[in-house]
Structures are given as structure tokens and as C-alpha cells.
Amino acid sequence: MSIVKLENICKNYYLNDVAFPVLNGVNLQIETGEFVGIVGESGSGKSTLMNILGVLDHPTSGKYYLNECDVFSYEEDELAALRNRTIGFVFQSFFLLPRMTALQNVGLPLLYRNLSPEKIKEQSFKMLKKVGLEEFHDRKPTQLSGGQQQRVAIARALVGEPHLLLADEPTGALDRRTSDEIMSLFLSLNRHDGMTVVLITHEEKVAERCGRVLRMEEGCLCQVEQIK
């Protein structure tokens, strides 16, 4: 079953009524349980594509079906609920709140679900354990290494049990060894838990560990490499 289907997605930005195309008729289908890497140079459109996949931005034209639902037929409050319940986000910058513990940071997405504090704590601890950081649950971000902070961010992305995990340059701020560890975690989530993962990167070595690689150039998905 396809979890993601994009049909002829175009995105323009405007300056003084002059259109600057960023995405040019992107078509993409991702099956449930896939691990897809999207590579490309800076300015190729890959982050804009990720924002549309994450329902953080609207295309100028085209259709986006998520779990066979026409995403952009939803009202804004429905889109917010969809993001919260269906999509998990991981970014290059960890975006952890400095005054909160790892456990509290992980639980943030659940605050919008009317769950009890006990249930939020239980689910958050479960996710910290999944990423191997349960013993650091009471530490603040400044007391954690970069790799540990990214693991907390991944636990936060997973805490709502999303169908789709989107990772935008998740290893960009990490050294090679830590980057390898984070990629191994993504692979485990995909292979053992069946998580559908879409990862944006400019690093070829990172992309090589994904199950399927799409290459973006000048707003187009112009090359597909099946590497595994």
C-alpha cells in the first residue's frame, strides 16, 4: 500500500509578482515500510519537497495523498491534527527546549492529545528506551552530547506513533561516527519496526544506507537509484 503519493507537485515562490519555480512537476510514490533517501545539492528543492511531505507548506499546484487521503482538501485545524498523529519530524538542529529534561522534551507532542501526565510520562520513557537513552531521562539538553540530543529528538518524533518519519539532514551536525550510529538507529526503526522513513541529505555516504535513493536536481526528481 502506498503511504505517500505525489502527483505533479509544483511550487513557486514569488518576488514582485515574478514566479521562481522550486519544484517542477514532482511525482513520487512511497510504499509503507520503505526507507527512501532524497539527495541533492543545496537549492535543488529537496527541503521544499520535505516541507510539503510534512504538510508544513502547500504546493502551488498538484496533489498529495497521504494514506490515500487528499491532504490539501483538509482545513488547517485538520492538517494540524494530521501532522501530530501521522508524521514524525527529525531535523538537523535538534530543537530541544533547554529548560526541559529529555523525558519532558520527548513528551511534547502528546500534550495536544488530552492524555494524562502519567500516560505521557510512560509513553515518553518507552521511546527513550527505544533509542537507548532511558538512563538519561532526567538530563537537560546541555548535559547531552550531540548524538544523544539527536536521539532524544528521534524519540520525540516517535512518541506519537506516526505512520511516516521525515528526517531533514539528521546527521548534518554530527561527526562521522555519531552519524553512523544515528543511521543505524533509523535502519533499525525501518527494518525491525516497519517504520516508513524519508531522509533528506546532501551526503552520498548517508544516502547509500537507504533502501531507495531519489536524486533532486533543479526541482525535479530526475534520477532513481535502486541500491539495495
Image (cartoon, grey):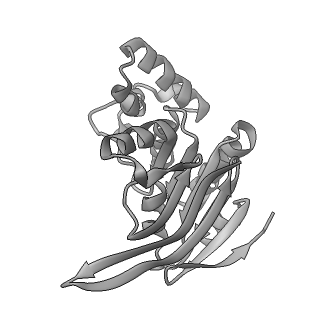
Please give the name of the residue rendered at 69% of the width and 60% of the height, measured from the top-left corner: 210
Residue 101 pos. (x, y %): 36, 30
- Which image quarter holds the C terminus? bottom right
Determine the residue located farthest toward the bottom in the rendered image.
18
Q: Is residue 222 above or below residue 72?
A: below
Q: Position of residue 174 (x, y in %)?
A: 50, 58
> Is residue 91 shown above or below 38?
above
The picture places residue 123, in percent across and down from the top left corner, at 50, 22
Question: Which residue is pictured at 43% across the width and 19% down the height?
Answer: 121
Q: Is the residue 211 above or below the residue 184 in the image? A: below
Q: Residue at x 42, y 60 (%)?
A: 51
Residue 28 in sight from this viewpoint: yes
Image quarter of residue 27: bottom right
Task: Choose between 203 and 6: the one closer to the eye.
Answer: 6
Question: Relative to residue 66, is residue 101 drawn left or right?
Answer: left
Which of the 4 image quadrants contains residue 141?
top left
201 versus 121 height, above or below: below
**What x and y, as percent, mark residue 202?**
54, 72
Please identify the residue farthest to the left as the structure is shown.
Answer: 16
The answer to whether residue 171 is visible is no
